[in-house]
Image (tube, grey):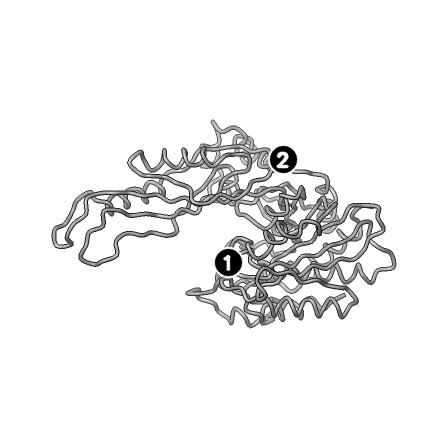
Amino acid sequence: MLDTVDVLQRLIRFDTTNPPGNEHAAVSYIADLLESHGIATQRLAKDPDRPNLVARIPGDGHAPPLLLQGHIDVVPTTDQPWSRDPFGGELVDGWIWGRGALDMKGGIVMMLDALVRAAHADSAPAGDVMLCVVSDEEDGGTHGARFLVEQHRELFDGVRYGIGEFGGFPLSLAGRRFYPIQIAERVGVRFRLTVRGQGGHGSLPVRGGAMARLGRVLRRLDRKRLPIHVTPATRLMLEAMIAHTDGATRRALSALLDARTAGPAMAVLGSRLGVLEPVLRNTVSPTIVRGGDKINVIPSEATVELDGRMLPGLEPEQFADEVQAIVGDNVEVTWTSEEIGVGEPDMGLFDLLADIVREEDPTGIPIPFLLPAVTDGRWFTQLGIQHYGFLPMNLPDDYDFRSTVHAADERIPAEAVQHGADRMYELVSRYGR
C-alpha cells in the first residue's frame, strides 16, 4: 500500500503542462515506484520526451484482462488567479492543492495503489491487470493513447473493459446523492465559420462588413441553442434518476426524455440542471477569432473557430446543419476535424462499479453517465474496449467539482485520494469473481 498523499504531492510537482507536456520525468518517477514493488514496466514513445508507461500484473486466467488508464499531462495555469503554487503539491487543512489533483494525477495515484496492493496480495486477480499512464490527453492523445492504440494494439488483446476518468463522485439533486459512472462521452468536432463583406481603408468606415457580420454570428451562438437529442446513454441516465426522485423534479426529468417537452422542462430545473443540458444536445463554443492583419485596413473576411461537442450516434454533417441553422445561410460552415465516435455502451461491468459505490454509501444512487467532454477512453473504444469513467472520490457536498477542474485552485481532499484508492483496489480484487 502506497502513501497516496505523498505520491500525489510528488506527481503534482512535476510540471507536465501540455503543451509542451514534458511528461518524461513524471513517467520515470512512476516507473521507479512500480519497479521498487517488483512490477515490471515498459515505456513506449512517439517522442522520447513524451513517453507512455505500461505495466501489467498477471491474473489467474478466469477473466479477460482489465485496463486501468490515466493521463499524466495537465492543462496550463496561465492567467489563472491561484491562491497557492499550482505545482507546489501543498497539503493544507486536509486538502492537496495543485494542477492535476483532480484531472487526473489523483486518479493515477488511485490506480497505482490498487496495482501495488494487487501485486502483493495472497491471490492473483481473476484477470491480468494492465496499467497505462499516458501522455498528451489534454491535446488530443497523438503522443499518448492514440499512439498506443494505433501502433501497439497487440498490448490490448483480449481486454474488454477499461477504467479511466471521470465518474464515481457525488452529484446532489433534489435531496438525493447520485454517483454518475461514465459509460459514454461526446465526440469532438471542430468547426470554422467564415463571414465576408466589403473591405477598404480604415479611414473610410464600412457598415455591415465582415466584422459586423461576425458580431451578429457570435450573438446568435450566444443566445440560441441547438436541438435536443435523447441518446441511449442519456436515456439510461435519466431513467435511473427518475426512479429515485419524485414531485416536480421527477416530472421535469421525465419530460427530458422527449425532445418535444425537454425545453420547458429545462426551464423548470433551472440551475439544478447542471451537467444534464450538454448531454441532451450538441454544443459549440467560440474559442478563436481571426480578422484582419493591418490596423488601417478593414478586412473583407473574418473567421471564428468553434469547439464543437457532438452526442454519440450522430453524424458531423447533421451537426453542421444544426450550426448552419443558427448562424444563417450567409455564413460558410466547415468542420476542420472530427474524432471517432463510439457505439452502444456495454453495461457488463456497471453493476460491479455500482455495488462498490453503494457499499460505501448505502444512500448513494449510482447512475450511468454520458460525459459532456471527451477523454482518452475514445481511443481505447476503437479496440472494442468499453470505457468506464470511475475515479471514486468522496467529495464534500458543498464542493463544486466543475468550478475547479481545469481552473484556478484545483485541489482534492487527501481523504478522497485514499478513499478512491481503496475503491479501486476493491474493483481489481472483485473483477471477474
Residue found at x 17% / y 57%: 296
Q: Which residue is mark 1?
A: 406
- Determine crowd level at label 1: few under 14, some 14-19, many 20+ residues with C-alpha closer than 10 A: some
Q: Which residue is mark 2?
A: 344
Q: How far across and how far down the image is residue 367, in percent? A: 64, 41
Q: How far across and how far down the image is residue 279, in percent? A: 52, 40
**Quarter of image, res 294:** bottom left
389 with respect to 197 (left or right): right
Q: Relative to 290, is 74 above or below?
A: below
The N terminus: image quadrant: bottom right
Q: Residue furthest right?
A: 122
Q: Nearer the viewer, residue 60 or 149?
A: 149
Q: How far across and how far down the image is residue 302, in percent? A: 28, 48
Q: CA distance from mark 1 to mark 2?
A: 29 Å
Answer yes or no: do the residues labelled 1 and 2 have beta carbons within 8 Å?
Answer: no
Q: How far across and how far down the image is residue 124, in percent? A: 84, 55
Indicate the amino acid at tag 2. Answer: Glu
User: Mark 2 falls on what kind of element?
Assistant: loop
Q: Nearer the viewer, mark 1 or mark 2?
A: 2
Q: Nearer the viewer, residue 1 or 118?
A: 118
